[in-house]
Image (cartoon, grey):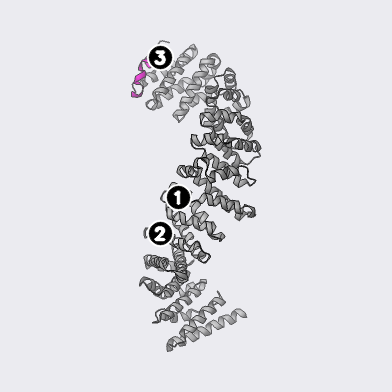
Amino acid sequence: MEASTKTDDLLILMEGLVVAVENKSDDISDILDSLVSQIQVSGSNCGDCSSFVTQLETLLQWESKATVARAAQVVAELAKSESGRENYGNIAILKILVELIKTKEEDLDILTQVCRALGNICYDNDKGRKFVLDTECLPDLLGVLERSVNETGERGRTLRNVAAGFLLNLLIGQEDIQEKAIELGVTKLLCSVLELDGTVPEGEEASTHVLLILGLLTDSVSPCDSLLDEKLCQVTVRVLGVSSSPEVSELCLELLHGQAENENVKNHLAHAGLCELLVQLLEKHKPLVDDDETRNLMKMACDLIVLILTGDVSMNALYAEGKGKVFQQMVAWLSSGDEDLQITGVLAMGNFARTDKHCIQMVEAGVSKKLLALVEKNNKPSGDIRLQHALLSALRNLVIPRQNKAMVLEDGLVDAVYPMLAIPTFPVVFKLLGTLRMVIDGQESAACKLGRKKDLVTSLVTWCGTEDHPGVQGEANRLLAWLIKNSKDQEVLTTILESGAVPYLVDMLIAEHAVMQNEALLALTLLVTMRLTDAEANLLEAKIGDKLTTLLNDFGPSLTCEMVQNILSLVDQLTKSGVLLYHLVNSGVSRALSKLSSEENVTSINDQITQLTSMLDSG
């Protein structure tokens, strides 16, 4: 009954307006004001008002500017409902409204209400949006937006809000128009609106519109051509810092997170103080994180910090010789009781540890000890995979500098990470093997300790044969080779031979990467030098001659002189076995070496090649 009464009241007002328009009465403005109020009360229950369209068309062209503005406001209110968009989004009304924008109407109230009306008509209305786009009024709308930026006070803010809202509804789903808007300089205008309205509560709606538009526009350009220049990054960070609106904060985070893959954006955000701000906000709000939505926001903020740290320039700026606030807070988060903050701290350590200088300073400051303490609590299959992966990544980076290896080994790295061999997850295994390989480089004692562990070597042989994770397969092969090279130990070689590792080392000769080929050459040369008789059967079974021939024939022109010398050393050692000498000759190694001698990259060692081929041929 109440809805029916409201509709009846609305129809009475409309009938009164019809008469007023016919008589050009002075009551028109009052009736329009009453209509606006009644429509706002009625909401979507406005009934069939289609007979009222003609009067609105007339009033939108009325001589009085105040009347035109009020008529446009009525259209805007009616177009908030789906039926209103259908009835008042007709071509005649749309044409008049667009013309008011295109003629560069000076009256702020008219522009404000026309933008509201067109924005509401275009909302979720492909038909209305298409007509407006066909009139090519985008440059005119941007002109209105530019004017709104130059207007002060509440009226300017209102115009910015409705113009931005209109632009948002116009651009949704329109990639071609989005690109055109970018070409017309919309980004600079949006930045200006955000700068004016993003830091005050009254500007929240306009800011929301702008951030949504920027989200649309950034999706239409490649990450390498980000729309976020230094100024826009600074403004967005400032808005994020002062906004009390959860929606605005979330939109700021989403926008920045989506663009932070770009190196320039990372640098802009680092220098704009975003990471410091995020740390402050996370520390402030972490006690209030009690549902999935806020937890996801927290994760996005954490991800954004880590993403910015992946840039070299931004990482160096935030490290600040170990004195940066962000670096120090990340170290503190290693001891955080919050899982996401702790993982963020570990990931940050891995990113800060990307230069030898940083790694040395960090180990001296005790960062590696903190990481190892975390490893000891999370080195079982039941541990958090994300944390395990992050810890191993950080430790691997830290032990790259030669002077760090002994220190971190002394702190207990091997014992801390060794139980992680039982973790079946390949990404964790990949990082574990890389960490062990890196830490034993030049560390004979550690290489011996690991190489004598039969369970480790057996696992490595198993992973050498896996097809499920090429990275693990490669690291397992490389670690076997590094154990031999760095230990030079008879007991290690016994473990290697008994585990069935030789065929994989032989296959490694024709690996895709030259560095792995060379590692295999060095490891096999040591093996046959120290244990030729014991390795003979395994080498024959693995067809080492065929692999060497393939290496020489397929990779010959790209082999460095050093690698060719390593091949010659291996072949020379192999010829000390009569069985292997016969095998090498039958495999075509001599012919392959002769062919290689014509390559420019080995002219300096031609005599050595000739001498060895002669020996093979005579053998």
Which amino acid is tagged 2?
Answer: Lys
Among numbered discs 2 and 3, the one appearing first in the sequence: 2
Compared with 537, 26 (above or below) is below
Query: Which quadrant of the view contains residue 249?
Result: bottom right
Among numbered discs 2 and 1, the one appearing first in the sequence: 2
Main SS, magenta region, reads helix
Question: Does residue 96 appear in the picture of this structure?
Answer: yes
Q: Residue furthest top?
A: 618
Q: Nearer the viewer, mark 3 or mark 1?
A: 1
Compared with 255, 203 (above or below) is below
Q: Residue at x 46, y 13 (%)?
A: 575
Compared with 252, 3 (above or below) is below
Q: Residue at x 57, y 36 (%)?
A: 365
Is 614 magenta? The answer is: yes
Checking the image for residue 127, the label placed there is none
Binning the other alpha carbons within 10 Å of mark 2 as few (below 14), some (14 to 19) or many (20 upward) gives: some
Q: Which residue is mark 3?
A: 612
Task: Specify start and end residues of the magenta stretch as a single range.
Answer: 599-619
CA separation in Å, label 2 and label 3: 71 Å
Q: Which residue is mark 2?
A: 188
Q: Which residue is mark 1?
A: 268
Query: Which quadrant of the view contains residue 7?
Result: bottom right
Which amino acid is tagged 1?
Answer: His
Query: Which quadrant of the view contains residue 66?
Result: bottom left
Find residue 339 and report its horizontal and vertical position in percent. 62, 46
